[in-house]
Each structure stands twice: as C-alpha cells, then as structure tokens.
Image (cartoon, rainbow, N blue to C red):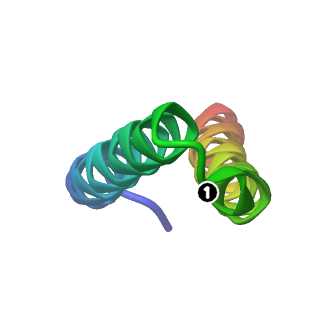
C-alpha cells in the first residue's frame, strides 16, 4: 500500500538526485569545453560517455517515478 507521504518522500529524494546529476553534467560540459578550447581533444569521448550514462540514470529515475505513480493510482482505484 502506497501513501501520499511515501510518494512525496520518494519524489523529493529523486528531485535531489536529479539536481545533483544535472550539476555533474554541467561540470562535465564545462570541463570538455575547456579541454576543447585548449586543444586537448582526448577528454571529449570520456565526457560524452559519462554524460550519456548520467542521462540514462535520470531517465531511469523518471521511469521509476512514473511507475510508482501508476501503481499508486491503480491501488486507489480498487
């Protein structure tokens, strides 16, 4: 049984995680841009792969929130 309080706690935690991941992605972007401007192209691929992994993490968290909401609504309807 899912309660509104559990959903609020889950959503708050996931929003915090997503905000941390976005800050890390911005840091990766600035580091890759700095490396590109100083002619160090070797950092571009690792930064791209890391940023893609973080994007997939954010997508997974969003998928989990939608699944949680779907289960909660289904239980409320019963």
Question: In this figure, which residue is indicated by the disc labeled 1?
Answer: 54
Q: Left of 70 or right of it: where is 16?
A: left
Depth check, front residue: 54 or 48: 48
Q: Is residue 61 above or below residue 19?
A: below
At x 23%, y 52%, the residue is 16
Image x and y of residue 44, in percent: 70, 50
Q: Secondary structure at mark 1?
A: helix
Q: Left of 41 or right of it: where is 3?
A: left
Q: Left of 73 or right of it: where is 16?
A: left
Q: Quadrant of residue 26?
A: top left
Depth check, front residue: 31 or 78: 31
Image x and y of residue 6, in percent: 29, 61
Q: Is residue 53 above or below residue 74?
A: below
Mark 1 Cα within 10 Å, few/some/many (few <14, many 20+)? some
Residue found at the far front of this picture: 39
Q: Quadrant of residue 63?
A: top right
Q: Left of 8 or right of it: where is 75?
A: right
Q: How many numbered badges does the structure rendering display? A: 1
Image x and y of residue 74, in percent: 71, 40
Where, quadrant-wise, is the C terminus in this rendering?
top right
Image x and y of residue 32, in percent: 52, 45
Depth check, front residue: 15 or 73: 15
Depth check, front residue: 8 or 59: 59
At x 57%, y 38%, the residue is 36
At x 71%, y 55%, the residue is 60
């Amino acid at each position: 049984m899912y309660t509104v309080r559990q959903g609020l706690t889950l959503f708050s935690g996931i929003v915090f995680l997503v905000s941390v991941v976005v800050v890390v992605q911005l840091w990766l972007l600035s580091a890759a841009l700095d490396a590109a401007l100083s002619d160090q192209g070797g950092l571009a691929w690792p930064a791209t792969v890391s940023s893609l992994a973080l994007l997939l993490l954010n997508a997974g968290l969003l998928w989990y929130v939608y699944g949680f909401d779907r289960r909660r609504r289904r239980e409320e309807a019963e």
